[in-house]
């Protein structure tokens, strides 16, 4: 039987949001104490599927590493590294380009969302992105992939690729990785539109809280967040048809590491005029120290670079034998 292993990644493109923090970073850090090996990656090869300014990409990659560390990632407990520094990811991705089918890629909703009407003009890399993501996961034979709701379809495709590889070459080589999507913050929504996820690529900065926002900006964004005129209900059932209210309650619950029910036990019956300032105080208390620590770490990036160098060596030690064996299975 394959040993359990956790893998996940985040793109070093743009500013990190509260969605990335609650849906990814914070959960990744919690998992490093689960007793299962944890491997986390800055996926710069994914980031360049859309043009990146080279200096910005270099800075954002270090900033993302700083964010992992600021959120409590311990480089002794977890492997933290930069995808492009471990060539086995790109190697296995090519093998998977030859296993995956064009029809499978055509069903990926994220490509359709990102490309819109311009599919013909997008990079081939953006289209093939899910095959690289499958390689990221399977090059470690990872079994558990903590992600937000938006990545579920890509993890399912990873399973399809693993199954087809195993079938085509009559082996039991790759495991079937499971997406781990749990908690109240797997889909943090935009503050301006309860039907869209909070995203670093949303053109409206008021739609998201960035980890780099200062206290006043965070308070202002929450004060201006779209809501309805009703008071908060006393049970989560009452949030069903109220996506904006539900989002703010879920954010509060995730930040205070409790359930939405508990939040409503405290705030049920109150108006947003009372709830929003409490949420703003909580967000500032949680995010402020993280952004301060990111800034401190970015003052001297040699520490970050040393951690990433060591992480890449450790990652390569696991990945290289696996990709070599995959090539051998295929006849190379
Ligand atoms: P983004 O979608 O912001 O460009 P990535 O694609 O790099 O960020 O995603 C990094 C991780 O953050 C993924 O696990 C993704 O599911 C998670 N994530 C991104 N946005 C949200 C959100 N609004 N709510 C919950 N998780 C999110
Ligand atoms: Na995403």
Image (cartoon, grey):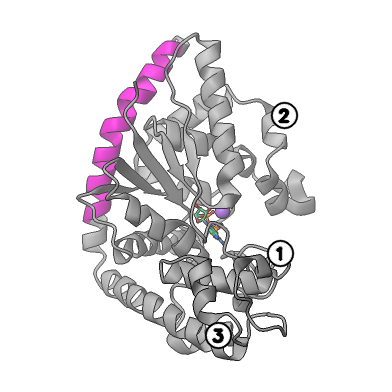
Find the magenta span and give its range: 306-329
Total number of numbered discs in the rendering? 3
Residue 264, given in percent of the width and then of the height, sits at 54, 74
Q: Quadrant of the N terminus?
A: top left
- Label 3 and label 2: CA atoms lie apart by 46 Å
Residue where numbered disc 3 is placed: 276
- Report crowding for label 3: few under 14, some 14 to 19, many 20 or more residues within 10 A (C-alpha): many
Give yes or no for contact between labels 3 and 2 (Cβ–Cβ under 8 Å). Answer: no
* Identity of the residue drawn at 66% across and 84% down: 231
Residue where numbered disc 1 is placed: 195
- 80 over 176 or under it: above or below: below
Q: Is mark 1 within 8 Å of ligand 1?
A: no
- 34 over 59 or under it: above or below: above
- Label 1 and label 2: CA atoms lie apart by 28 Å
Give yes or no for contact between labels 1 and 2 (Cβ–Cβ under 8 Å). Answer: no
The disc at residue 103 is: 2
Horizontally, residue 112 falls left or right of residue 26, namely right
Residue 102, given in percent of the width and then of the height, sits at 69, 28
Residue 185, given in percent of the width and then of the height, sits at 52, 61
Q: Is mark 2 within 8 Å of ligand 2?
A: no
Q: Of circles 1 and 2, which is in front?
A: 1
Residue closest to the eye, 110 or 301: 110
Horizontally, residue 243 falls left or right of residue 147, namely right
Residue 323, given in percent of the width and then of the height, sits at 38, 24
Q: Of circles 3 and 2, which is in front?
A: 3
Tell me the SS state at disc 1.
loop
Q: Of circles 1 and 3, which is in front?
A: 3
The disc at residue 36 is: none
* Identity of the residue drawn at 21% across and 61% down: 303
Residue 209 showing in the rendered view: no
Tell me the SS state at disc 3.
helix
Residue 80 sits inside the magenta stretch: no
């Amino acid at each position: 039987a394959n040993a359990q292993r956790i893998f996940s990644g985040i793109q070093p493109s743009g500013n990190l949001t509260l969605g990335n923090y609650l849906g990814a970073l914070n959960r990744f850090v919690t998992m490093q104490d689960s007793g299962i090996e944890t491997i986390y990656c800055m996926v710069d090869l994914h980031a360049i599927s859309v043009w990146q300014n080279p200096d910005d990409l270099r800075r954002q990659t270090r900033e993302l590493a700083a964010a992992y560390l600021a959120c409590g990632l311990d480089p002794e407990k977890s492997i933290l590294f930069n995808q492009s520094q471990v060539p086995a990811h790109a190697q296995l991705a090519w093998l998977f380009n030859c296993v995956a089918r064009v029809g499978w890629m055509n069903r990926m909703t994220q490509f359709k969302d990102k490309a819109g009407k311009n599919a013909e003009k997008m990079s081939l890399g953006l289209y093939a992105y899910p095959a690289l993501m499958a390689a990221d996961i399977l090059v470690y034979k990872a079994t558990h992939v903590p992600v937000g709701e938006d990545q579920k379809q890509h993890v399912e495709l990873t399973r399809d690729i693993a199954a087809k590889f195993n079938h085509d070459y009559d082996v039991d080589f790759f495991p079937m990785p499971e997406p781990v999507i749990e908690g109240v913050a797997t889909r943090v929504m935009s503050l301006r539109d309860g039907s869209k996820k909070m995203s670093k690529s949303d053109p409206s900065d008021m739609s998201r809280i960035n980890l780099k926002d200062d206290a006043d900006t965070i308070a202002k964004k929450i004060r201006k967040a779209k809501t309805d005129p009703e008071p908060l209900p006393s049970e989560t059932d009452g949030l069903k048809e109220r996506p904006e209210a539900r989002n703010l309650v879920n954010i509060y619950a995730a930040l205070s590491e409790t359930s939405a029910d508990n939040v409503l036990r405290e705030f049920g019956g109150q108006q947003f005029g009372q709830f929003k300032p409490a949420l703003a105080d909580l967000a500032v208390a949680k995010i402020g120290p993280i952004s301060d620590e990111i800034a401190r770490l970015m003052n001297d990036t040699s520490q970050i670079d040393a951690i990433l160098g060591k992480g890449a060596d450790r990652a390569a030690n696991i990945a290289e034998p696996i990709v070599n064996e995959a090539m051998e299975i295929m006849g190379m």
